[in-house]
Image: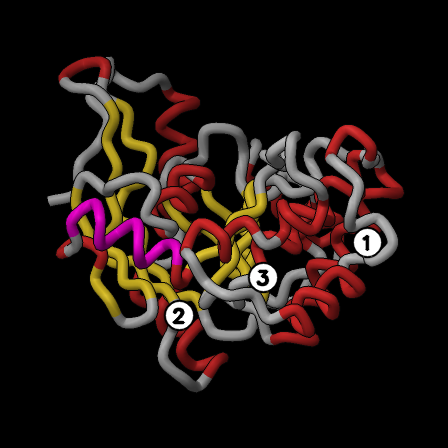
Amino acid sequence: MKSRVIQDEPSQSQSDKELRMAAITIPAVEVAARASTANGGPPVVSGRDLNRRYGEGETAVDALRGVSLDVPKGQLTAVMGPSGSGKSTLMHILAGLDTPTTGDVTIAGTSIHELNDTQLTNLRREHIGFIFQFFNLLPMLNAEENVVLPLSIAGEKRDQGWVDELMGRIGLKDRRSHRPSELSGGQQQRVAIGRALVSKPTIVFADEPTGNLDSKTSGEILELMRSSVDSYRQTTVMVTHDPRAAAIADRILFLADGLIVRDLGRSDAHEVIAVMEELSR
């Protein structure tokens, strides 16, 4: 049985909302099936019956309530939803940064439920790249050194030809020796994107990658992320609240109250806004 939040008797408006959400929620098996059908190959990442409960008893909160999904190879999947919908929790669990209360995640064919901490760290290092809202660059390293940091940590020899290509792709070939304090916010995010791509990971997770940038710079970063998918077939999952960001995705999953309630293909910003407005009623 799936867990639920223990709370007082719901008001009429709460009951109405729960009935409406139940009516539009997509069965978990259908979400997974849509991805498999669209892609035609094995998923890069899968989540099955994911529940995440925080707290106990009357203070318990269910951030996820039985979510299942498959992430296809070579596509950009956006995850959207109102505040508290569970989108960040879902990303953290799919990336192995958090553990579901129940359910399992498979990355590149490996069930992470069966891994110890060291094995999980190694799996993330080999298969996962991260892009964060606040860049998380090391201030004492220059742009290129920050980009190749995952290789340095893993003790891997860099392919300088690939690094040169990547620095050009992210538009920082002439700024590679500059430290983060000498770069603009958009340039720092470009470094963060390069860092996520340098090890050619199985999947990149991006958490609000444009949330700390102005409109013009956000557009440039979104173009770069779309280009990484198109040029390198870089599978990407992006959590965002920005309809413009979601509009570059091949697929958009909408979460509400810990459930996937919409699964859209390529959509424009106006369509994304309409769905978000419906979910917020």
Direction from residue 235 to residue 100 in the image, left or right? left
Residue 50 vs residue 235: left or right?
Answer: left
Q: Is mark 2 on a helix, strand or loop?
A: loop
Count of all numbered marks drawn on residues in the image:
3
Which residue lies at the image location 46% right of the left edge and 44% below the top edge?
255
Decide: is 276 above or below 247. above
The label nearer to you, 2 versus 3, is: 3
Residue 220 pos. (x, y %): 83, 51
Q: Which of marks 3 and 1 is nearer the N terminus?
A: 1
**Could you say which is closer to the camera, residue 42 or residue 24?**
42
Residue 61 is a magenta residue: no
Q: Please indicate whether residue 138 sits to the left or right of residue 189 in the image.
A: left
Residue lying at the far left of the rendered structure: 1
Q: Could you say where residue 36 lies in the image, as x and y percent from the top left?
A: 40, 77
The CA span between labels 3 and 1 is 14 Å
What residue did someone put label 2 on? 44
Q: What stretch is highlighted in magenta?
A: 116-125
Q: Distance between the residues labelled 1 and 2?
A: 30 Å
Give amino acid for label 1. Answer: Leu
Residue 213 falls in which quadrant of the image?
A: top right
In screen coordinates, is 145 left or right of 187?
A: left
Q: Residue at x 58, y 61 (%)?
A: 198
Q: Indicate whether 111 appears above or below 149.
A: below
Contact, CB < 8 Å: mark 1 with mark 2? no
Q: Please, what is the dominant secondary structure of the magenta stretch?
A: helix
Give residue 198's mark. 3
Q: In the depicted view, which residue is nearer to us: 26 or 176?
A: 176
- Image height check: is 145 above or below 26? above
Q: In which quarter of the image is the C terminus?
A: top right
Q: Residue at x 28, y 31 (%)?
A: 62
Name which residue lies at 59% across and 54% down. Answer: 148
Residue type beneath disc 3: Val
